[in-house]
Image (cartoon, helix red, strand yellow):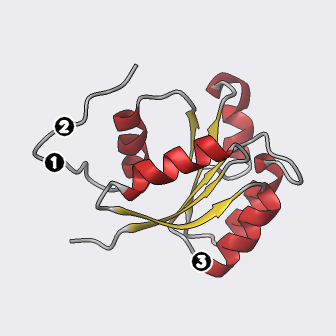
Amino acid sequence: MQDAVRVVVADDADGVRDLVCLLLDMEPDFVIVGRARDGAEAIEIVSRTDPDLVLLDVAMPVMDGLTALPVIRRTVPRARVVIFTGFSERALGEQASTLGAHALIEKGLAIDSLVDRLRDVCGRAPVRTVASRPVQS
């Protein structure tokens, strides 16, 4: 079995950050190694934790995600960086990709779909449990 994907989640909305961390904590192949409220804090945490995956919100105080993105890519070049935003992919996709993001995921995606997309970005096979969680609407 592969080691768990080490994740840093950066989002200024406490509820969103906590929900994503809780969701990933329930998955056997992910482990949260850091939580950040803004881009500057994300850079600091990433430099200390050397994660495999960084989920990065765009609209954050102090330093936004798009400003932090190239710094994070230079700090941990092997890490996968996913922009996780309320903005549409059409509006930010090309800019995020140019700055080094591996993917852009819009907030509001179904829970199971979010986890599957993150596994895909990390090159991991889907993990299937005996009982599947229902998708909440």
Q: Residue at x 26, y 29 (%)?
A: 134
Q: Position of residue 10 (x, y in %)?
A: 66, 54
In the displayed structure, 75 sits above or below 84; it is below
Query: Distance of mark 1 from mark 3, alpha carbons?
Result: 29 Å
Is residue 60 toward the left or the right of residue 25 in the image?
right
Which of the 4 image quadrants contains residue 80?
bottom right
Q: Amino acid at mark 1?
A: Thr
The C terminus sits in image quarter: top left
Disc sitting over residue 129 in the figure = 1
Q: Earlier in the sequence, mark 1 or mark 3?
A: 3
Q: Residue at x 78, y 47 (%)?
A: 66
Is residue 22 toward the left or the right of residue 85 in the image?
left
Is residue 7 toward the left or the right of residue 74 in the image?
left
Residue tagged by mark 3? Answer: 49
Q: Residue at x 25, y 48 (%)?
A: 126
Q: Amino acid at mark 2?
A: Ser
Disc sitting over residue 132 in the figure = 2
Local packing at callout 2 (Cα closer than 10 Å; few below 14, some 14-19, many 20+) is: few
Q: Is residue 2 visible?
A: yes
- Residue at the limit of the structure toward the top, as seen here: 137
Which of the 4 image quadrants contains residue 113?
top left
Task: Looking at the picture, tell me which residue is in the foreground, 124 or 99.
Answer: 124
Disc nearest the viewer among 2 and 3: 2
